[in-house]
Image: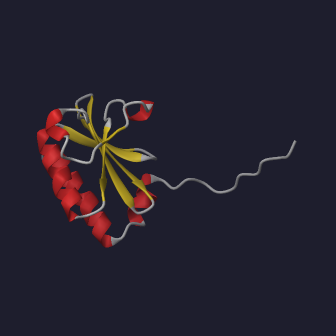
Amino acid sequence: MTKLVISGTAKTYAEKLAALTPEKAAQVEAIKAALLQKDKKVHERISKKCATYNLGRKALAKISIIGQMVRLHLALDPAAEEFQKYPLKDLSDKTSYKDVPAMLRITSDLALRRAIKLIEAL
């Protein structure tokens, strides 16, 4: 049996955020501002993998970064008829995203505008 050697560590959310281009970092800040303006009781929790935004104990959204791709996970039903025009991916089968199953990739200014509209719909 061969010995498996794994070297290196996974980057944290803060490291990934620091490595983003200025345009992508500005998009993350715009999403963060929209989520925190939603209600006075919305607070941010940064873990190793993502930033989670909660209203009390209820998860509203998560922001995760993979490479230069920013992903926004929202507590919406991606199969709902009113959200069919948005390119939402259903991640409800994954346990870590069962509270926030609708995933939207933030790739452009249009995607950012869509994300802000979806945040307002929460």
Q: Estimate the x, y position of residue 22 in percent, counting from the top left.
A: 31, 71
Q: Is residue 35 above or below residue 93?
A: below
Does residue 2 appear anywhere in the picture? yes
In the picture, the quarter occupied by the C terminus is top left
With 58 as the anchor, is 71 left or right in this view? Answer: right
Whether residue 122 can be seen here: no
Q: Position of residue 38 (x, y in %)?
A: 13, 43
Residue at the spot x=25%, y=61% of the render?
27
Task: Name the colour scheme.
Answer: secondary structure
* Residue at image point 42% right, 53% down: 13
Is residue 33 placed above or below 22 in the rendered structure?
Answer: above
Which part of the image, by quadrant, shows the N terminus?
A: top right
Question: Residue drawn 17% across and 53% down?
Answer: 114
Residue 99 image position (x, y, % from top left)? 32, 30
Most distant residue in the bottom direction: 22
- Rendered residue at 22%/54% (across/down): 31
Residue positioned most to the right:
1
Q: Is residue 83 left or right of residue 74?
A: left
Looking at the image, how many numbered discs can be counted on the residues? 0
Q: Position of residue 18 (x, y in %)?
A: 40, 65
Taking depth in this image into account, of 48 and 116 the one nearest to the observer is 116
The residue closer to the viewer here, 70 or 56, is 70
Tell me where residue 103 sits by quadrant.
Answer: top left
Query: Image height check: is 33 above or below 101?
Result: below
Q: Nearer the viewer, residue 102 or 56?
A: 102
Q: Quadrant of residue 120?
A: top left
